[in-house]
Amino acid sequence: MEQTYQPGRVINIGAGPAPKDCFGRSYMSVQIAGRPSEWQPAPMTSSDARDIKAQALTEAYIQVTALQAAVSTQLATPEEITELVLWQTYLVLMNRVVPDSPLDIVWPKKPEGGLS
């Protein structure tokens, strides 16, 4: 439930699900005295970072495997060859992410497209 703060009391102004960040984690409602509450992403934990990294690596391995098969069998289109390089780069960069320092992580940008 979203709330707003007025000196001396809290007033409920509506209900609804918390928004999510780009990793699917729910935001938390933060309230500072004298100001309306606002949604902010919860601080990322090492556990969050490990989960996000594992999901990203799984997706990258699936994409690289499928695209590499297309290249190896000489069935790849020029676009698939380009996508393979992008996904391989993403895979390498994601492998370098250190989840133990989640607030310092610069997440690699996931390639668009890929094989379904």
Image (tube, rainbow, N blue to C red):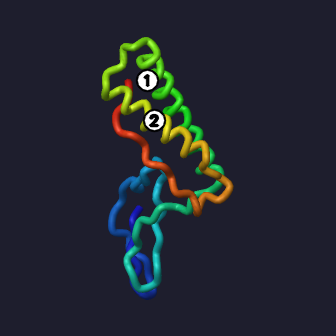
Residue sitting nearer the eye, 85 or 36: 85
- Location of the N terminus by quadrant is bottom left
In the rendered view, tell whether residue 43 sits above or below residue 73. below
Percent across and percent down for residue 49 are 59, 50
Could you say which disc has been placed on residue 3 in the image? none
Quickly name the residue at label 2. Answer: 87
Q: Secondary structure at mark 1?
A: helix
- Neighbour tally class for label 1: few under 14, some 14-19, many 20 plus, Cα within 10 Å: many
- Amino acid type assigned to the residue bearing label 1 in the image: Leu
User: Is there a contact, CB below 8 Å, between mark 1 and mark 2?
Assistant: yes
On screen, residue 80 above or below 108: above
Q: Position of residue 38 (x, y in %)?
A: 40, 70
Q: Considering depth in this image, is 105 or 52 the residue closer to the camera?
A: 105
Foreground pick, 102 / 68: 68
Left or right: residue 92 versus residue 35 is right
At a point 62% along the width and 46% down the height, the residue shown is 50
Q: Earlier in the sequence, mark 1 or mark 2?
A: 1
Amino acid type for the residue under numbered disc 2: Trp
Task: Give residue 18's position: percent from left, percent from top.
Answer: 41, 56
Place residue 85 in its image quadrant: top left
Kindly identify the residue that appears in the image at 56 percent across and 62 percent down: 43
Determine whether 34 is above or below 90 in the image: below
Place of residue 87 in the rendered image (x, y in percent of width and height, measured from the top left): 45, 35
Q: How far apart in space, not on screen, are marks 1 and 2 (Cα)?
A: 9 Å
Q: Which mark is on residue 67?
A: 1
Screen quadrant of the C terminus: top left
Extreme-top residue of the structure: 73
Q: Residues within 10 Å of mark 2 (few under 14, many from 20)?
A: many
- Secondary structure, mark 2, is helix
Q: Is residue 19 left or right of residue 94?
A: left
